[in-house]
Image: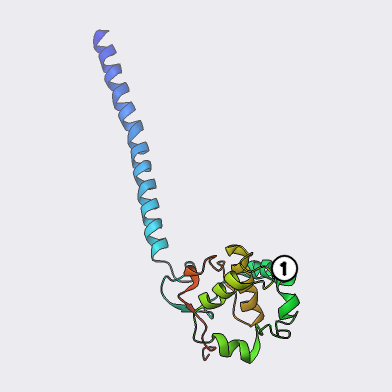
Amino acid sequence: MIGKASEGAAGDRDHAKSATRPKAVLAFAGVAIAVLTLVQVAASPDAVRRPLGPGSVWDSVYTLAQAGRGESTYRATCANCHGDSLAGINDAPALTGPDFHKDFDGNSLSSLFGKISNDMPSDNPGSLTNPQTASVVAFVLKYNGYPAGSMDLPAGVDSVSAIKFTPKPLQ
């Protein structure tokens, strides 16, 4: 009987070891999958991640939802001076058309962002938050026919300094 009891205990230990092996293998596999996923995301195409280097306003740098929020802000705080069609009224410059492109083509998007953030609206300069400013810039981009994408325009003048106003690329 003693022999049987010690065999049972040894059998239980072997069974316990064999039960923990699959758990360890699964844990290792989970960690390996997580690491491989991070590597894949880091190497993903621009459609998933915005490039860190220079880009242009043609690289789909805002979302339609963000432009919609910007239109609301624009209508409430900017349209009185720049007009419903962004053509400008009296001394307020146009935010679309040849004059707009003459002023901004070749410049960084941060020039428009900074101008709006620091100087607008003219009756209360600097009152827009960075997210409001980014949304207004997104609306201006949409109105001017620049394509929307899957990521909001960043809400900071430094964050948009690498994005350039460029002429439409040839198709």
Q: Is residue 69 above or below residue 5?
A: below
Q: Is residue 91 visible?
A: yes
Q: Residues within 10 Å of mark 1 (few under 14, many from 20)?
A: some
Residue type marked 1: Ser
- At x 42% / y 70%, what residue is drawn? 52
Asked which colour scheme the image uses, the reply is: rainbow
Label 1's element? Answer: helix
Which picture quadrant has residue 132? bottom right
**Residue 85 x/y as whole percent:** 73, 82
2, 69: nearer the viewer: 69
Please state if 150 lies on the left or on the right of 36 as rendered.
right
Q: Position of residue 138 (x, y in %)?
A: 61, 73
Please give the name of the residue rendered at 32% of the width and 32% of the height, measured from the top-left corner.
18
Quadrant assignment for the N terminus: top left
Q: Is residue 61 visible?
A: no
Mark 1 lies on residue? 72
Give the x, y percent position of residue 152. Answer: 57, 66
- The one nearer the camera, 71 or 116, is 116
Q: Residue at x 51, y 69 (%)?
A: 157
Q: Write the residue at 34% across / 42% down.
A: 25
Residue sitting farthest toward the front: 123
